[in-house]
Every structure is written in structure tokens, then in C-alpha cells.
Image: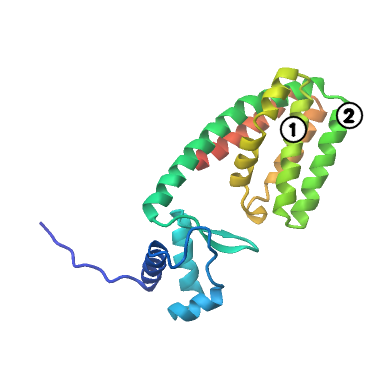
Amino acid sequence: MKINKPKRLSLVEQVTKQIEDLIHQNYWQVGEKLPPEKELMEQFDVSRNTLREAVRALVHVGLLETKQGSGTIVLSSSVFGAVLTKYIEQRSLLHILEVRMALESEAASLAAERRTDDHLSKMEKNLQACEIAFKQNDLAAYLTADIHFHQAIVEASENSLLIDLYSTFSDSLYYSVEQNISDLQTNQDEQKIHEQLFYAIKEQQVTKANHIVRSYLLKRKERLV
């Protein structure tokens, strides 16, 4: 049997391990924000790139979370707990996406058949709100407008039971959309898909509207899996 010599840890791996140990020892507690990047660079005596690689690795396993304008926050006190939480969240998101696919694809088909000028006006208003939020890089405003756009499509289905079902789904819908779109700049195709869906409904292209929704959510599902 061939025994390989143990490899020395890279600088990135050393910093990653130190941050992980500090969190495990409650030096930084769950929910607490890490010090600014410059301060951490000085504490660990490493370059910006090395620190960012280490943080990115811990974000990937779910120990940390980075949000634009909010800094880096501790999500879990152990890698095992973070991985377990992430797994549960993924399963939850998967189920939400499957329900969205069933409800939203049918709603898009019915909306294309039954939409009125009032329905189209409401969709277009929310579509414009999405566009403004996107240009201003306002994620919170974009998420709200995005959800209202989907709700307007469901309302255009003129199916009261479908509308009621979808309204009870609002919390899960927000969670799903929020997890799918964590950064507007890396989701620039999002607005184009909205526009394509709007015009398919406006032109009463039933099959196309259904296909746009199913294709989009299938890609999200594949990425999650």
C-alpha cells in the first residue's frame, strides 16, 4: 500500500481553519458580524485575496453568510450543523419549487387565456417596479416587485381556488425567491424572463407562457439539486 506524505496546509486553508476554530470556541457567535475585511487582514496577516478565499470556503459550507452592505455574518457554530441546516433548507426549497412549478405554470396558461386590460396593467406596473429596483440595485424592492408580479399573473387566471391557494403560499414564495436571487448583478437574465412571460400572456400565447415558467423553474431546480 502506498502512503502519501501529508501535505502542508495552504495559507487559505490555515485561515479557514482558524476562523472555523474561533467560531467553534464562540469567539464569534452565531448571528454576530465579523470585523471589517481590513481588520481581519491585519489580524491574520494575509492579503485580501487570501482572506476572501477563506471566507468564500466557509460561506460555501454554510458557516458564514455574506450580504452586500451588511458584511459577513456567522450562521452556525459548527461545519456539521451548517451542512445539516443547508441540507434541510435545500430539501425545503426543492419542495417549494415543485409546488411553484405546478401552480405558476398553470396560472400562466390560464392568464394567457383570460387576462383583461386591468390584469395586464397590474402586471406591467410590477414589471416596471422590478426594472427600477434592478437599475438601483435595490434587492429588497426587487424581491417585493417580483412576488407582486407573480401574484398578478395568478390573479389573471380568474380561478378563485388557485388564487386562494397561492395566497397561502406567500411566505414560502418569498423564501424561495429570496434564496434564488441573493444578488441582482449575478441574475441579470431574471428581468428578461419576466418580460418574455408578460408578452406571452399579453399576446395570449398559452403554450409559450406555460413553457417559460416551467423552463425557468426547472433550471432553478436542477441548479439546487
- Image quarter hosting the N terminus: bottom left
Residue 204 horizontal/vertical position (percent): 80, 24
Name the residue type under label 2.
Asp
- Mark 2 neighbour density, 10 Å: few (under 14) some (14–19) many (20 or more): few
Name the residue type under label 1.
Gln
Choose mark 2 or mark 1, whichever is in front. 1
- Mark 1 neighbour density, 10 Å: few (under 14) some (14–19) many (20 or more): many
Q: Which residue is mark 1?
A: 151
Is residue 146 shown left or right of residue 68?
right
Tell me, for residue 118, which label it has, or none.
Answer: 2
Q: Residue at x 60, y 35 (%)?
A: 217
Question: Mark 2 vs mark 1: which is more N-terminal?
Answer: 2
Q: Residue at x 82, y 29 (%)?
A: 202
Quadrant location of residue 68? bottom right
Is residue 199 shown left or right of residue 29?
right
Can residue 50 be seen here? The reply is yes
Q: Are marks 2 and 1 in contact (CB under 8 Å)?
A: no
Q: Residue at x 44, y 43 (%)?
A: 87
Whole-angstrom CA distance, mark 2 to mark 1, is 14 Å
- Frontmost residue, 120 versus 147: 147
Residue 42 horizontal/vertical position (percent): 49, 81
